[in-house]
Image (cartoon, rainbow, N blue to C red):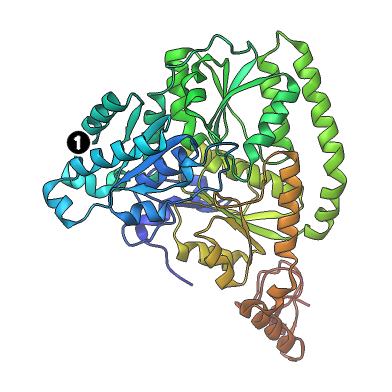
């Protein structure tokens, strides 16, 4: 057992406990020094948002480590250009720190643009650039004038704030493209999908659903993104925002300047996927056939997958899961999906949630659920062991935590290669959850093996007897529930 750092206590709430009855979870804070947060830096936040723009040049102005760390960081796929898969860096060295790196950056950009002929270029500022004071914006302006393409500075110095500040820097860079393209050919029934990054090809699944409804997708920001589509995205009639943490800022700017309303949606799980389709259909109420097609699509897709989901549910009922993801909106969907599969969410947290997000999480979670903002590995391990979870849903940084504890793991972050969005994604998710939870390997994990040995010893000890479920007198070695033992003298006759 570990003690929580005092500075972290207000960022953790137990639903139904004293804390959530009297206080509101703290969030949006800089990570506590020494806590080794799972949250990434500002630069990483901007990089993961912009990286999937496939026909743009992405140049990291800073040490080579920053480019290496974020290379291919998303499992985003492209239906065409592969330029985004390259990770270019100015590789700033000691002499560049002393004399400045502006000349090096300009020379690199001119060479790369001449060789690759991109539609645009994004230049990411890292911590060292903020310290030495390179004027990246001035370099971008000069190179844009020489090459004739947009060269966009991304002010993402890592120390400037949190990962969420990186999202804002990315949105500001993207917005310089919005409104510069021709919109004359765009359908009156058209949308932009914001916060969908085409992990494992999910954007293609979602675009196909809307196409079946008769709705044109002008641009996907930024999965399988194209610079020309982003330029004309202001011609769409509605913005649908999936990853609210990363793209709500851009959606608000487009609403302010171009009059495009936006709605928050999710494409994970049957309920949320269906609601996203209905939201778009309700918006275009001038054409009632769109709603009719939406109802037919949902009916067909659910009828196809529901029997298979029920088979998985029978084997997953009563299992417990921990969730730790980047955006809290994704956590809402996961809580609902797990409940549909008969599972309980025992721990849930996010890197970038705000107060409204955590209030909603407290509303939809079961009593006793631990809700945590900006967690660190020790906290996550502590809560997973305390709740004796069977599954951990997170990203690449959380995988080692789960495996070291002998817990099944499901990757629901941006490194995965299996589509989990849409109706087909719901089946893929259920299969992965079942395969992870039901694997026989976990019976050999030390914590499981030790518990089995303790229970076997207590079963043969005359001083102990099986305890009634929920008696509250459990031993530290035991997990509340059936199969629990207490001292015979503690059990009422």
Residue 105 placement, left or right of 85: left
Q: Identify the residue at image location x=70%, y=11%.
A: 285
Q: Where is residue 438 in the image (x, y as percent from the top left)?
A: 75, 66
Of residues 420 and 68, the one nearer the viewer is 68
| Picture coordinates of residue 148, whole percent (x, y) | 33, 23
The one nearer the camera, 78 or 392, is 78
Indicate the secondary structure of the residue bearing disc 1: loop
Q: Name the residue under label 1.
A: 135
Quadrant of the drawing holding the C terminus:
bottom right
Nearer the observer, 362 or 191: 191
Q: In which quarter of the image is residue 443?
A: bottom right
Q: Position of residue 354 (x, y in %)?
A: 46, 39
Q: Where in the figure is residue 404, as x and y percent of width and height? A: 55, 72
Most extreme residue toward the left, as rendered? 99
Q: Which of 132 and 19 is in front in this view?
A: 132
Instruction: Tell me if mark 1 has few (under 14), some (14-19) or many (20+) residues whose alpha carbon lies within 10 angstroms of its own.
Output: some
Residue 241, picture quadrant: top right
Query: At 12% from the left edge and 51% from the top edge, which residue is drawn?
Result: 98
The mark tally for this picture is: 1
**Residue at 47% across / 27% down in the picture?**
227
Is residue 116 visible in this depiction of the protein? Answer: yes
| Image-based side of 29 in relation to 337, left or right | left
Residue extending farthest front = 115
Answer above or below: position of 227 versus 269. Answer: above
Q: Is residue 265 left or right of residue 168?
A: right
Asked whether residue 353 is in view, the answer is: no
């Amino acid at each position: 057992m570990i003690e929580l750092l005092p500075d972290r206590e207000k960022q953790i709430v137990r639903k139904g406990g004293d804390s959530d009855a009297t206080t509101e979870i703290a969030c949006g804070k800089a990570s506590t020094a020494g806590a080794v947060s799972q949250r990434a830096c500002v630069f990483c936040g901007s990089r993961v948002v912009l990286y999937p723009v496939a026909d743009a040049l992405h140049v990291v102005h800073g040490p080579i480590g920053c480019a290496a760390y974020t290379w291919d960081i998303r499992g985003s796929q492209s239906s065409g250009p592969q330029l985004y898969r390259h990770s270019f860096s100015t590789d700033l060295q000691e002499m560049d720190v002393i004399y400045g790196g502006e000349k090096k950056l300009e020379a690199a950009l001119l060479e790369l643009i001449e060789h690759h002929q991109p539609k645009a270029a994004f230049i990411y500022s890292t911590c060292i650039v903020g310290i030495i004071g390179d004027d990246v914006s001035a370099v971008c302006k000069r190179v844009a004038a020489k090459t004739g393409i947009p060269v966009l500075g991304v002010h993402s110095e890592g120390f400037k704030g949190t990962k969420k500040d990186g999202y804002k820097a990315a949105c500001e860079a993207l917005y310089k493209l919005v409104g510069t393209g021709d919109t004359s050919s765009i359908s009156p029934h058209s949308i932009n999908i914001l916060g969908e990054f085409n992990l494992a090809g999910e954007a293609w699944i979602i675009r196909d659903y809307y196409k079946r409804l008769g709705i044109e997708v002008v641009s996907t920001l930024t999965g399988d993104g194209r610079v020309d589509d982003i330029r004309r995205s202001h011609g769409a009639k509605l913005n649908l925002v999936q990853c609210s943490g990363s793209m709500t800022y851009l959606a608000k700017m487009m609403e302010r300047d171009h009059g495009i309303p936006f709605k928050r949606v999710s494409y994970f799980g049957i309920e949320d996927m269906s609601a996203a389709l209905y939201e778009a259909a309700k918006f275009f109420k001038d054409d009632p056939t769109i709603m009719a097609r939406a109802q037919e699509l949902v009916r067909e897709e659910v009828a196809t997958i529901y029997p298979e989901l029920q088979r998985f549910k029978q084997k997953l009922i009563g299992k417990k899961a921990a969730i730790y993801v980047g955006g809290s909106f994704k956590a809402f969907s996961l809580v609902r999906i797990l409940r549909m599969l008969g599972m309980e969410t025992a721990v849930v947290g996010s890197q970038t949630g705000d107060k409204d997000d955590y209030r909603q999480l407290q509303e939809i979670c079961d009593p006793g659920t631990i809700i945590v903002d900006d967690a660190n590995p020790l906290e996550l391990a502590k809560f997973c062991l305390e709740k004796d979870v069977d599954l951990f849903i997170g990203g690449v940084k959380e995988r080692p935590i789960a495996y070291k504890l002998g817990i099944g793991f499901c990757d629901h972050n941006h490194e995965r290669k299996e589509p989990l969005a849409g109706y087909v994604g719901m089946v893929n998710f259920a299969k992965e959850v079942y395969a992870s939870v039901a694997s026989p390997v976990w019976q050999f994990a030390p914590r499981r093996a030790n518990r089995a040995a303790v229970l076997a010893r207590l079963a043969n000890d005359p001083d102990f007897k099986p305890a009634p479920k929920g008696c509250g007198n459990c031993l530290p070695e035991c997990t509340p529930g059936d199969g629990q033992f207490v001292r015979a003298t503690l059990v009422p006759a």
